[in-house]
Every structure is written in structure tokens, then in C-alpha cells.
Image: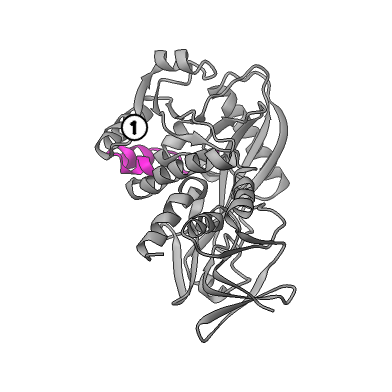
Amino acid sequence: MEKEFDFAIVGGGIMGTSFAYHLLQRGYTVALFDKNYTPIEASVRNFGQVVPSGFGAEWQKYGIASMEIYRSIQKVAQLDLREEGSLYIASNEEEIRLIEELNTINQKNQYDSIIFDASDIAKLYPEIKHSYAKAALHFPLEIQVNPKTTVERMLHWLKEKKQLHYFNNVTIQDIEVSSSKIHLTDNFKNEYTAKKVMICSGHDFKTLFPEIFLNAGLKTVKLQMLSGIANNTKIKGSILTGWSIRRYECFQECPSYQQIIAQEDPNSFQRLHGIHILAKQEADGTIILGDSHHYASHGPNAAGTDYEDIINVNDFMIAEAKKILNIDHFELRNTWAGIYSQCTDKPILVENISDDITVVTGIGGKGMTASLGYTQDFLNKLNF
């Protein structure tokens, strides 16, 4: 006998889970399908830095809304949320100019940020080297979550308290519309029906509606990160550095940005591998460092997967982190990659297969920060 729901969501990462959260809050019956036993893709292979500060004005609003929703979920689901703020460190006069310009933009947008000088940084962030930090832009309201457990704990709470129907280890292989219902068939030949379907499939472009993805202007991005132990080093909040200032979307709105970027060497190691140094410390003392960005036009086989590339990128990131943070010795414990999909010509892919089947994917690196706010706004506009 077919199982029947108001909504079926294909893809159990942060985007699919965010849709499920809001729909359940609104009283709908929801089925969430994930092809893995537990989320293992980009939603758990990231920093867990929730940083609306990195976005332009439109997406910053989604990030701010997400932070408030994370705080509300934290009260009931214990997400290991920490409210320690974010810090963008400027290492030279060009980067100081950019953070000052962004601070002015933030004031107009009514988003809290504070300029720190070198003495402020030395007092508040002793883990940062004086030789690197010339100034910094602090975002006091931004938060950190544990990337490995956040989605998992949200799913557990939604199943236990909100009656989410969660089907893991299940791949939806076929979707058909007949009369007023949508029929879904999984890899075990089980069938389900729903009134509406959301497809949040990340970088899986081949299982459902591959012809849609083929010409949708999507690329896949592989981020390389690592973690380890540095004795006696304590890092507070999200640390972002000069290369983040030179990379993040928010700074592209600054008047000096294009002139400064035009002077960079496009063939430098960090530009070729898309590296900008980020750091965050988990509750157990483990320090996460990263990250690099390698791109492919279609599918998950992003460039830079050779073993030699992995070692070289890791060595480079550790060496650069030692220039920025008071780390004398770093003991590498783990290295991994996260792969996400990103649109080349728009912020996100929204494609209506029919009136009741919608693809929403390609959010890029904004997923952990913006998904809860974006999906809330998406459903509000459709009056769900």
C-alpha cells in the first residue's frame, strides 16, 4: 500500500532538512528521503561557520533569519551552537580599506560590525599573531555550529517531536504525476504518493531529471579541509583572514574591491587552488583549517583530487595558518573534502518540473548559513 504525504522531499542535507522543518512547523505531513544512512555530503563536510557577513545584502537577510532559527532550534534540539562571533583579519593596508568600506555598508544595512585595531586584537584574540593582524572587522552576533552533528540532531528532533517521516538508505529513482497525486518509487520498488515534491539533491545530477541539470548552468565545487591539534592554542569564534576578505561576496560590493583584486597574481598557488584560510576550534579542542576550492563543469569529479595535490594543499594551508595563528606545532588528525553544487549565473537553481514538483539546489557555499532563512522565505512567497 502506498504511503501518502502532503510533501515529499528528496535529499536530506541542510536544504532538504530546512524545508522539512518549516513545513512541519506549518502542520503539513512530510516525508524526507536520503540515499545515505545519515547525511555525509557537504552539509556535514564544512566549517559550521554561520556567517551572514560573507554575503551580499539579499542573502545576508537569509543568513540573519537562519541564525535566529538556529537559536530557536537550539533550545529544544541541543545543536552545540556557540555564539562567539566572527572576525575578518586584515593583514595590510588594502585589506584594511576593504573592511572599513564593508563596515560602512553594514551600518547602512543595520548589520552589527565593529572595527578592531591591532591593540584590540592583541587583547581580545591572543591566538592571533601581531605580525599578521593590522586590523579586523568583528561580527559579534554570528554563530558556530558543529557541522558533523547539526543536521543529524535536527533530523532526530524532527522525527521524535514533529512526526517527520524519515526514509534513509532510500534512493527515489522515479517520479510520475497522475491525476492530483505524485507517485514516487524507490530503489526497493516501494511506492509513495505526495501532493507536492521538493528535490534538494545537492550535486546528484543523474538520478532524477538529468536533462534539467545538464543545461542548468551548474558546476560542482570541491572544498578541502583538515583538522588537528595545536597544544595550548585556543581559538574563539570564526576566524577569517585576508584572503577571505579578497574572496567573499560581501567585499565585492566595496568601492575598492575591483582595483585591489586586479593587482593580484592569478597564477599564485592560493589563486590556482582557490585557497583562503579559515579557522575554527571545536569543543573538544580540535582545530579545523581550510579551505581550497576546485571546480568542475558538471558532476562530482572536481579537479585537484590527486594525492599529491591533496598533500600540497594541506601543507600550504598549515604553513599559512602558522603565519596567522600562534601555532608552533600542528598535529594533523584528519583531512577531507566536501562537494557542493553551485550555479554559474544565478544565486540558486529553482526549476519547476511541474506545478507540484520543484527542484531547489545549487546554493553553493551558502548552505549552512542561509538554508533555514531561504526556505522560510521561499515557502512564505508560495503561501504554504
Answer whether residue 58 is visible to the viewer in this image. Answer: yes
Confirm whether the magenta stretch covers residue 260.
yes
Res 207 → quadrant: bottom right
Q: Is residue 384 left or right of residue 75?
A: left
Q: Quadrant of the C terminus?
A: bottom left
Q: Position of residue 320 (x, y in %)?
A: 57, 28
Q: Position of residue 380 (x, y in %)?
A: 38, 60
Residue that protrudes farthest toward the left in the picture: 108
Q: Is residue 89 left or right of residue 226?
A: left
Confirm whether the magenta stretch covers residue 256.
yes
Residue stretch rendered in magenta on the structure: 249-269
Towards the viewer: 145 or 293: 145
Look at the picture and state if 293 lies above or below 188: above
Q: Residue shown at 47%/31% (left/top)?
A: 241
Label 1: element kind: loop
Tell me the kind of residue under disc 1.
Asp
Answer whether residue 346 is visible to the viewer in this image. Answer: no
Q: Residue shown at 54%/45% (left/top)?
A: 272
The residue where tag 1 is placed is 112
Res 321 → quadrant: top right
Q: Residue shown at 70%/49% (left/top)?
A: 306
Res 264 → quadrant: top left
Look at the picture and state if 100 lies above or below 339: above
Q: Is residue 133 left or right of residue 75?
A: left
